[in-house]
Amino acid sequence: MLSPKSVLITGCNRGIGLEFVKQFLRLAKPPKFLFACCRNPGAATDLNTIAESNPSVNVVELDVTKQETIEKAKSHVASIVEGEGLNLLINNSGIVNRQGIEDVTREEMRSCFEVNAIGPLMMAQAFLPLLRQAASHHSADPMSCNKAAIINISTGVASISENSSGGRYPYRSSKAALNMITTNLCLNLKADGILCTAVHPGWVKTEMGGPNALIGTEESLKGMMSVLEKLQGEECSGKFYHGVRGDLIGW
Ligand SMILES: NC(=O)c1ccc[n+]([C@@H]2O[C@H](COP(=O)([O-])OP(=O)(O)OC[C@H]3O[C@@H](n4cnc5c(N)ncnc54)[C@H](OP(=O)(O)O)[C@@H]3O)[C@@H](O)[C@H]2O)c1
């Protein structure tokens, strides 16, 4: 059963992140602490409405490109979990840029790498002590999202082996970098008992996915939550899952 005691998700004010919050609250055993991060809590109307009726939801200001907000969020989380650590970090924030070879710019490459690759890496680094703390409380258990895990929300178009159309330089390459960060974290955090894996949410109707996308956020999350539940054991770490189909995507 998926039942992490504490979960932190980035980019929760809309889209897939907001739906993650809703689905975690619907679990048979919802998290005791659900840290729902966003850049501008004052403007996160839907998220604030959820938080008002769910005391476990803690809305936290966090911009993955601003290190000081990451550090502040980490201190805040540490003060609330009181020695229990953080079980699950979901790096969901992302930006898309579909520029091709003719119009791609240095600036757009940089901003996609900042949000999609460097941000999640810095999040993993900052929250590592809390993830280690959580893992140490379940040291005899196999790796899982209930114990200690980092889930990086990637995309199918980051797959190098399945790239058949080119283009979208900033988005594809920054998420491919995130995939490499995922496999690296898997290797480096194995001894700590921390699982790290990448998940593609499908083509989802959000601001990023657009109105022509194949599925809504609920369907995407139904799939991803069931993938998260099935991540049990070391062999599930360092993989690239299709969150809707549940199978693996080639790197
Ligand atoms: N939708 C799809 O079809 C699809 C497909 C494959 C992968 N994905 C991935 O799924 C994840 C969620 O996407 P989505 O469809 O929900 O996109 P979305 O609706 O555009 O939402 C993106 C979220 O990321 C946040 N964000 C952007 N820059 C940030 C930063 N610097 N720091 C913190 N948060 C930041 C946004 O906050 P603001 O409101 O403040 O901008 C927003 O909450 C992304 O990683 C995306 O690459 C989506």
Image (tube, rainbow, N blue to C red):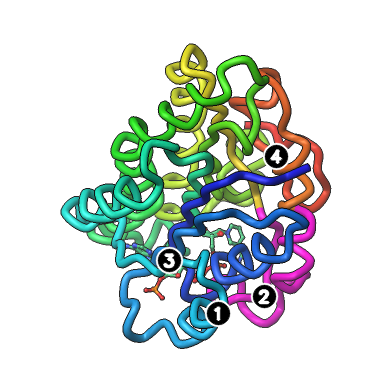
Picture quadrant of residue 240: top right
Q: In the rendered structure, which amino acid carries the disc numbered 4?
A: Tyr
Tag shown at residue 205: 2
Q: Is mark 1 within 8 Å of ligand 1?
A: no
**Residue positioned 65% across, 31% down in the render:** 144
Residue 187 higher or lower than 128, as above or below: above
Q: Is mark 2 within 8 Å of ligand 1?
A: yes
| CA separation in Å, label 3 and label 4 | 28 Å
Q: In the rendered structure, which amino acid carries the disc numbered 1?
A: Ile
| CA separation in Å, label 3 and label 1 | 10 Å
Q: Secondary structure at mark 1?
A: helix
Q: Are marks 2 and 4 in contact (CB under 8 Å)?
A: no
Residue 96 seen in the figure: no
* Residue indicated by mark 1: 50
**Residue positioned 22% across, 58% down in the render:** 69
Q: Are marks 3 and 4 in contact (CB under 8 Å)?
A: no
Q: Which of 195 and 105 lies nearest the eye of the viewer?
A: 195
| CA separation in Å, label 2 and label 1 | 21 Å
- Marks 1 and 4, the one that precedes in the sequence: 1
* Residue indicated by mark 4: 241
* Residue indicated by mark 3: 58
